[in-house]
């Protein structure tokens, strides 16, 4: 399992310029109409400052709906500094790219607590940054997709909330989620007995011990086990030939959403592996997904006393 996810990380570094090139037209460049506020602290845990970047249009029209980008990297690498969807801010959106504690610092659920802390912080600071606190979506890939789906499924679960950054009078509920090739059932993902017994595997490091000895923790960290009718709408994309996080991970999650009547969309791209990017036609579907969902009426941003 460790070798598999090491390949994910290395391959992710290789595809990053391709993602930027497809979306932005030129790797590493943003539209001239977009500005970036960098390294804003949203919380401090112990000695670690947790930070985010906000991409926004230079000439916004009204309060800006928000899409939060959660990076991948097998939960043990990556950072907010590469944000392949920053260009989307040109469409009168705020794109927020966040850091979270890696599992080299703390095991799960620290990563989810950090994500929820960001959502609450954005609502608490919405006026300062011209954000629409009632319209927040999330976009994540691989490990980031896993965390994004946990945001979609655990909004009303106090055991999954944490208190990172405070602002506990604000909701951490999100309105919609797009997840690329996400792990959704960690027990099923690590099926081979050899890898399940390995305390150095990537999932094991997230959980704080070998999967075979932490089955309950693996379920606790799996978005699939929180699916109910209150889950946010989800758009899933997966490569049909992905051997690192098999497409079954998205398929079983999609089926679970369908069973409870949650709005969901699944795209399996034939003959593609992990780290793929959305073909142009599907990229347009993702645009429409976010545009449609972020225009809807939603739950209040604050939590009633």
Image (cartoon, rainbow, N blue to C red):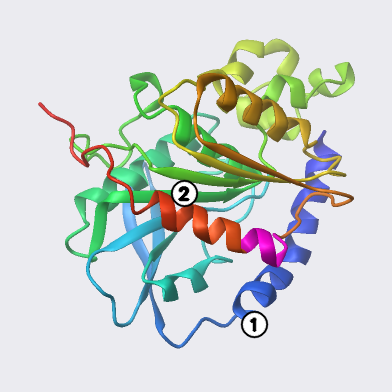
Most extreme residue toward the left is 305
Q: In the rendered image, which residue does mark 1 sit on? A: 25
Q: Residue at x 75, y 21 (%)?
A: 188
In this rendered view, identify the residue nearer to me: 128 or 181: 181
Q: Residue at x 47, y 20 (%)?
A: 228
**Which secondary structure dominates the residues rendered in magenta?**
helix
Q: Residues within 10 Å of mark 2 (few under 14, many from 20)?
A: many
Q: How many marks?
A: 2
Image location (x, y in percent) of residue 233: 48, 38
Image location (x, y in percent) of residue 119: 34, 45
Q: Is residue 96 visible?
A: yes
Image location (x, y in percent) of residue 177: 50, 44
Q: CA distance from mark 2 to mark 1?
A: 23 Å
Q: Is residue 98 visible?
A: no
Q: Quadrant of residue 266?
A: top right
Q: Residue at x 56, y 27 (%)?
A: 223
Image location (x, y in percent) of residue 53: 41, 65
What segment is highlighted magenta in the picture? 278-283
Q: Circles 2 and 1: CB distance less than 8 Å? A: no
Q: Residues within 10 Å of mark 1 (few under 14, many from 20)?
A: some
| Relative side of 212 to 148, left or right | right
User: Which mark identifies residue 138?
Assistant: 2
Q: Quadrant of the C terminus?
A: top left
| Residue 121 shown in magenta | no
User: Which secondary structure lies at badge 1?
Assistant: loop
User: Which mark identifies residue 207?
Assistant: none
């Amino acid at each position: 399992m460790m070798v598999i996810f090491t390949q994910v990380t290395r391959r992710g570094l290789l595809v990053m310029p391709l993602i930027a090139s497809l979306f932005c037209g030129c790797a590493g460049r943003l539209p001239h109409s977009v500005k970036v506020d960098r390294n804003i602290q949203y919380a401090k845990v112990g000695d670690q400052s947790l930070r985010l970047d906000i991409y926004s249009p230079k000439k916004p029209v009204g309060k800006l709906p928000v899409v939060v980008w959660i990076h991948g990297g097998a939960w043990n690498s990556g950072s907010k500094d590469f944000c392949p969807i920053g260009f989307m801010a040109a469409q009168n959106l705020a794109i927020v790219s966040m850091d979270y504690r890696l599992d080299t610092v703390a095991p799960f659920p620290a990563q989810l607590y950090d994500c929820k802390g960001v959502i609450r912080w954005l609502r608490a600071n919405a006026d300062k940054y011209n954000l629409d606190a009632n319209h927040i979506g999330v976009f994540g890939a691989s490990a980031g997709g896993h965390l994004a789906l946990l945001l979609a499924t655990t909004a009303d679960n106090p055991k999954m909330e944490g208190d990172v950054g405070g602002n506990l009078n604000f909701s951490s509920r999100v309105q919609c989620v797009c997840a690329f090739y996400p792990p959704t059932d960690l027990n099923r993902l690590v099926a081979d007995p050899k890898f399940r017994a390995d305390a150095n595997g990537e999932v094991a490091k997230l959980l704080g011990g070998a999967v075979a000895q932490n089955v309950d923790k693996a379920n606790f960290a799996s978005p699939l086990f929180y699916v109910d009718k209150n889950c946010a709408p989800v758009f899933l994309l997966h490569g049909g030939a992905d051997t690192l996080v098999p497409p079954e991970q998205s398929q079983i999650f999609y089926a679970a959403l369908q069973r409870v009547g949650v709005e969901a969309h699944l795209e399996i791209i034939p003959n593609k592996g992990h780290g793929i990017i959305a073909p142009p036609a599907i990229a347009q579907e993702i645009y429409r997904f976010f545009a449609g969902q972020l225009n809807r009426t939603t739950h209040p941003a604050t939590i009633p006393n």
